[in-house]
Image (cartoon, rainbow, N blue to C red):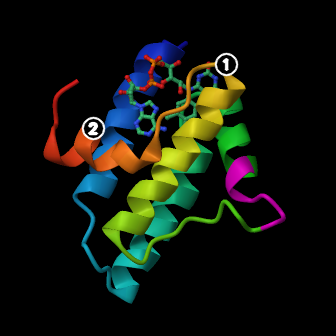
């Protein structure tokens, strides 16, 4: 079975990098593509329990966790909140989402 921690670190790098390179203002097509990607990703992520919780988080009946895809700023913030939801579940420290771009776009270093 996959190493869930190693897979997680690599996948978060990928997901935050996806937001860091997202258009500053996204066309409807881009938003549709990304919505499809997130739907597929959350079904195919090869840690099945992780994937199921992630799907349920996104589908919260309040609607508050729906992907926000209009811009890099919105999507980056949303992904940070998604990651924090997992951090909370695992008892890890939450990340201050004001700094997501410094961590994943402008700084690039760990
Ligand atoms: P990670 O959480 O992997 O974070 C990597 C780096 O990202 C951190 O060092 C920090 O610099 C930065 N970072 C941290 N928080 C944020 C944030 N909110 N926004 C931006 N940057 C941030 N593991 C399980 O055991 N059970 C699960 O149910 C589970 N679900 C997961 C669901 C998804 C969608 C993904 C991608 C991973 C999941 N994981 C799960 C793995 C888990 O989230 C961690 O990746 C793994 O435990 C390794 O943690 P880490 O402490 O090395 O840092």
- Is 108 rendered above or below residue 101? above
Q: Residues within 10 Å of mark 1 (few under 14, many from 20)?
A: few
| Span of residues in magenta | 57-62
Is-magenta flag for residue 51?
no
User: Which residue of the protein is positioned furthest toward the right in this rendering?
Assistant: 61
The residue that disc 1 covers is 91
Quadrant containing the N terminus is: top right
Query: Vertically, is 69 above or below 94?
Result: below
Of pointers 2 and 1, the one earlier in the residue sequence: 1
* Local secondary structure at mark 1: loop
**Vertical placement of residue 35 versus 26, above or below:** above
28 or 97: nearer the eye?
97
The secondary structure that dominates the magenta segment is loop
Q: Is 92 placed left or right of 107 in the picture?
A: right
- Can the viewer see residue 2 in this picture? no
Ligand 1 within 8 Å of disc 2? The answer is yes
Tell me the element at label 2: helix
Q: Which residue is mark 2?
A: 103
Q: Which mark is residue 78?
A: none
Residue 26 image position (x, y, % from top left): 32, 79
Residue sitting at x 49%, y 15%: 5
> Where's residue 38, x and y in %?
51, 57
Is residue 19 something one can see in this rendering?
Answer: yes
């Amino acid at each position: 079975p996959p190493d869930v921690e190693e897979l997680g670190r690599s996948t978060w790098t990928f997901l935050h990098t996806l937001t860091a390179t997202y258009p500053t203002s996204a066309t409807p097509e881009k938003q549709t593509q990304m919505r499809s990607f997130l739907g597929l990703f959350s079904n195919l992520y090869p840690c099945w329990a992780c994937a199921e919780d992630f799907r349920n988080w996104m589908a919260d009946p309040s609607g508050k966790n729906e992907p926000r895809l209009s811009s890099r700023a919105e999507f980056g913030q949303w992904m940070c909140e998604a990651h924090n939801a997992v951090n909370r579940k695992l008892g890890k420290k939450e990340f201050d989402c004001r700094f997501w771009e410094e961590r994943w776009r402008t700084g690039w270093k760990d």
